[in-house]
Amino acid sequence: MTSDVILVDTRAGVRTLTLNRADRLNAANDALLLALTEELKAADADSGVRVVVITGAGRGFCAGQDLGDVSGRDMTFTEHLNRTYNPLIRTIRGLGKPVVTAVNGVAAGAGASLALSGDIRLWAQSASLIEVFSNIALVPDSGSTWFLPRLVGYHRAFELMALAERVNAEEGQRLGLCEHVYPDETFREDVQAYAERLAARPAHTLKLTKQALNAAMTSTLDEALDQEAALQQLAGDHWEHEEGVTAFKARRAPVFVREE
């Protein structure tokens, strides 16, 4: 399945959504942002999809906003964000399935926010991230002010944003901006293999785990403990838990994927 701006491929429970504006380093226009949000919602509703991967075509992940697409438009910055980027980031964080952002090249501006929004971030060796907003005298948006300081701390985040410093893959992994870095030559195969490992894990449990982590990011310890207790009951009542316990007792690998 393909569209003009988002390529869609599903294999082994993994749906890969590829930003398809390679000639512009996948700079985002309205069509791309709205289509990506809709494809994410479609993946969430598809029981055959267990993991979603977001990546870019060509040599870039996402170069941020396509400034030519908004130049001269009769719309405020706030209206634009509330129509495009903010619903996209909220959809990713609220998706009931793991989202892997596979950063195959430069992730700049709002593209950096998109790169940081995944549950798992995998980078190619040639990938880089730059909070470029200050170069055009704008404030980081699309979630960067929320994601980045939680990863690197307030002061390093401010420096990266204020100076628009480019972070390469080695530094990105050291800072905790990505979980793994893979060679460019095998990047897409490595991402698929990793995503298939996730897809073999208990999907309902991962949905609840993501829900718990999202809530805990802005809760007190007492609130997190209460949330864990409530979600643990939902996990314990699900067939995945029974399968996990049965497999443990039988000394075999659990099978968490059931054929429809």
Image (spheres, rainbow, N blue to C red):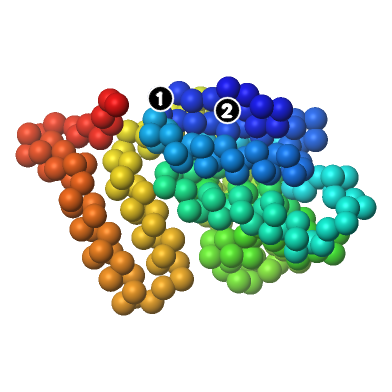
Q: Quadrant of the N terminus?
A: top right
Residue 159 located left or right of residue 135:
left
Residue 8: mark: 2
Q: Which residue is mark 1?
A: 12
Left or right of 33? Residue 12 is left
Residue drawn at x 80%, y 30% is: 23
Q: Give the vertical position of 248 relative to 228 (above or below).
A: above
Residue 112, horizontal then vertical, whole percent: 66, 51
Q: Residue at x 45, y 23 (%)?
A: 11
Secondary structure under badge 2? strand
Measure how far apart labels 2 and 1 are at the Cα level: 14 Å
Which amino acid, mark 2? Val
Mark 1, secondary structure of its residue: loop
Relative depth, front residue between 90 and 228:
90
Three-letter code for the amino acid on which mark 1 is drawn: Ala
Residue 165 vertical placement versus 38 (above, below): below
Q: Callout 1: few (<14), some (14-19), or many (20+) C-alpha neighbours within 10 Å?
A: some
- Residue at the left extreme? 249
